[in-house]
Image: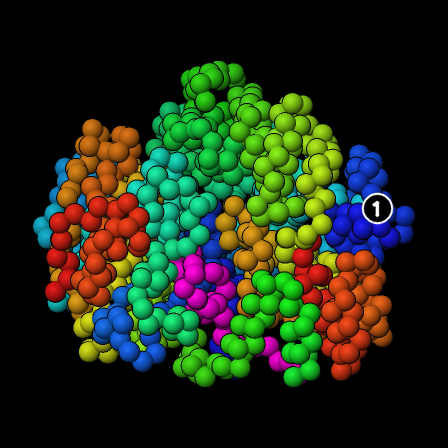
Amino acid sequence: MTASIDRRKFLRGLGGVLGCSIAAHPMLTTVTMAGANGGRPLGDHRLIVIILRGAMDGLDVVQPQGDADYAALRPTLLNPQATDLDGFFRLHPAFGDMMPLWNAGQLGFVHATSTPYRDKRSHFVGQDMLEAGTGMDVPLNQVKDGWLNRLLQTQKGLTSETAYSIGQVAMPLLEGPAEVRNWSPETTLLLTPQARLLFDRVYESDPLFHAASQEAMELADAGNGDMEMMAADPSQMAGLKVQDVEQLVDYAAGKLRQDARIAAFSMTGWDTHRGQAGGLSKSLARLQYAILRLQTGLGEKVWGKTVLLAMTEFGRTARENGTTGTDHGTGGVMVMAGGALNGGKVYGDWPGLSEANLYERRDLMPTSDVRAWAAHAIQGLYGIDQNVLENAVFPGLKMGKDPRILL
Amino acid sequence: MSKLTTLAAIRFGYGLPLPKGAPDTADAMLASLAGPDQAMQSLPIRASADLIPNIQELRQIQKAGKKTAAKNPKRDALLQDFSNAAEAASVITFARAVDSGDGFRERLTTFWADHFSVIAKRQLEALFPYALVDDAIRPHLTGNFADMLTAATLHPAMLSYLDQSSSVGPNSHFGKNQGKGLNENLAREVIELHSMGVGANYSQTDVTEMAKILAGLTMNADLLMEFQPRRAEPGPRELLGKTYDAPGMDNIHAALRDLALQPATGQHLARKLAVHFVSDTPDPDLVKAIAAAYNGTGGDLMATYTALLDHPAAWVEATEKARQPFDFMVASLRALGVTGDQLQQMPYKQFRGQVLAPMAGMGQPFKRPAGPNGFDEAAEEWITPQGLARRITWAMRVPPRLVEPLPDPVALAQSCLADRASEPLLWGAARAEDITQGVGLVLASAEFNRR
């Protein structure tokens, strides 16, 4: 049928370039959608969450060249060609095509932000915490669902049919009691009626197999009509592989134009331990491509009601490491875009980069909780009560003063 | 066949029917494990050393300049050798598991290969993930964990995968001259994933100190491990409260040995073993017993495995775990009577299409875990609508292409599940529309996919 999302294709060309521990991550795995059929429990606004897996170096993406200590920390990575944003921060050149959005107030950043995760700097725990949306006080193995899923559970009218997803890997962000489906477009399940009856009976006593097989049959029956648009020709953008981005973004945009209100997916390729200049440029170009294609795909009206948040598990070391890359750090950057955004600004308090101001004399000091920005965005978009956000969606969060990131 | 024997083969091996003469009780499995590694001897993979002449010749071709190198017809052939060796090794990995009577050894090998996950980053390194298993894991499988940890950490496959090959002590001769420095990647994962575990009591300072201890360790032009003193960080190092001040590689050996001996390491490995073999939420007493055996013997793995098999919680009737796709595939091939020999005779294209590609669809691209933390354990991660649909589809479509004639479905259920075949499964297998469907029903059944 359609161009399939082939994991092996994602892997090609990755190794050796980034040379990082998660080099084999498929660069982009799933997109998860939520919304409502009929009724409008979430109104007209759209929220798109992109998880940047691998720890994006915020100090390289939005470069604080106005900080007197920056140049010494980043001898090879400081990029004189970065575009001026506000006289203090400059934007990485690989994100240069985003400048029209910045100028239109539809692109913004939060600098020196992070989840409450500290100290061990493990990708795996960091990503779990980002998706769980909890603080350090909650043991992660007790958190079985993600913050977007908990958001869905707080809203009536979001039934099981309204959240569906495609892709190869489950995404904890949306995992939990509100039903979410996983299915990738190339999967088929052709069974005769007799075989179905037999499987029904054989799986009956094992709830996990029973539920999975029921859902597989329903999804196979629903067909993949929506995927037709994904048959686009493989495209290349100046040597950059973007076909997978196109597939997922076009699918998400199609759903968001209709009933879906929330979409979440992840992009990898940010773990730049080595040769960061090359690796980060590629990942940024892919992110830029995804955002600009979403803007086009959604159309002016829907884009005008959209906020996109791209967040990562933590930032990277303030100093370059010995291999023209950076190691795992703490404070980083959240990227925001969309027509509903009050953009054209770098939000967040700047902690400074002098050694005494760094977290553990090594990382950018976080001055805000990335969950607070997300909570304010959700409150602004959907009018959800602060109590619900601070207790149910992000347990233990103090949202603080409204930073007015929405128009 | 007794209930316990069936469970032993399914939970701690690659399933039924057992090859002739294979041990079928816990004691016999341990005795076999204490013996020689016959699979590695009878089914060898190509030694990395065999390919060093290729590396050297490729280096000569490269020296001639980029343009000439690309046109040199020998270059592709030399590179192709690496892919061929890896392809053969992938088939052999399956053949060893399908044929082995020493099933617990094969399962443990898979467990440790996942614990020390690496992937091949480039064609020249295609054999790396297999070489790490045969060089670092299998020879130390029943020895002391410190030896396995050391061998895996120092293996070129690991040095390359986790960037150690480019890490340099910032105050070393080379570091100062070239302005190069540390890369913490391997140091962090050795502590976080391979030994103590992320929940243990260590700090960022320990990670950085470990990176300084490892500095100097690199991979040379022949892709062999090499310690280069001019890249090593001078001065004493302090890791987890202990000072390391020995010359050359002695610090590295000592630090790895001490990490292996940390009680947290015993705890971490005990939990991983219990989760992998028995339950996603293992009995705390089982974990305690395994950890006590490990910590009480200074990391003796045979004693550790014995504690696992000796504990009653390891023999709980209910099969909570889902067979991972590799396990599912090996068990299916064995159940269908496909032998390792047949796999080796099969054109590689067919093997890829009928075995490797479907496994990737089930969520487990072979030797390509998403990161150094390996593949997921939880049954819910594997038995998703998508993952199960792929298993059903494989079970219904591929067996007729592998065996002729297909076995009778009821007989198949009895031979591969023995007393664990449920009434509904035997009922369904007898009522399938045709043999293909019946075989698919058995191989896709919950009983067959659990262990």
- Tell me if residue B148 comes above or below residue A177 in the rendering: above
Residue A121 location (% of width, % of height): 38, 39
Give the labeled residue for mark 1: B24
The residue type indicated by label 1 comes to Asp
Q: Which residue corresponds to the image point at 17% horizontal and 67% vertical from the top-left?
A: A340
The one of A314 and B80 positioned closer to us in this rendering: A314
Q: Which residue corresponds to the image point at 38% horizontal and 72% vertical from the top-left?
A: A159
Which image quadrant is residue B295 in? top right
- Residue B341 among those drawn in magenta: no
**Dot 1: within a 10 Å radius of its alpha carbon, few (fewer than 14), some, or many (20 or more) residues?**
many
Which image quadrant is residue B398 in? bottom right
Q: Which colour scheme is used?
A: rainbow
Q: Say left or right for B45 vs A310.
A: right
Q: Dot 1: what SS? A: loop
- Tell me if residue B379 comes above or below residue B154 in the rendering: below
- Label the magenta part by its dominant secondary structure: loop
The one of A255 and B446 positioned closer to us in this rendering: B446
Q: Which residue corresponds to the image point at 68% horizontal and 53% vertical from the top-left?
A: B319
Residue at the extreme left of the image, as rendered: A87
Residue B91 location (% of width, % of height): 72, 57
Residue A85 location (% of width, % of height): 13, 55
- Residue A184 among those drawn in magenta: yes
Magenta range: A164-192
Residue A177 location (% of width, % of height): 43, 61
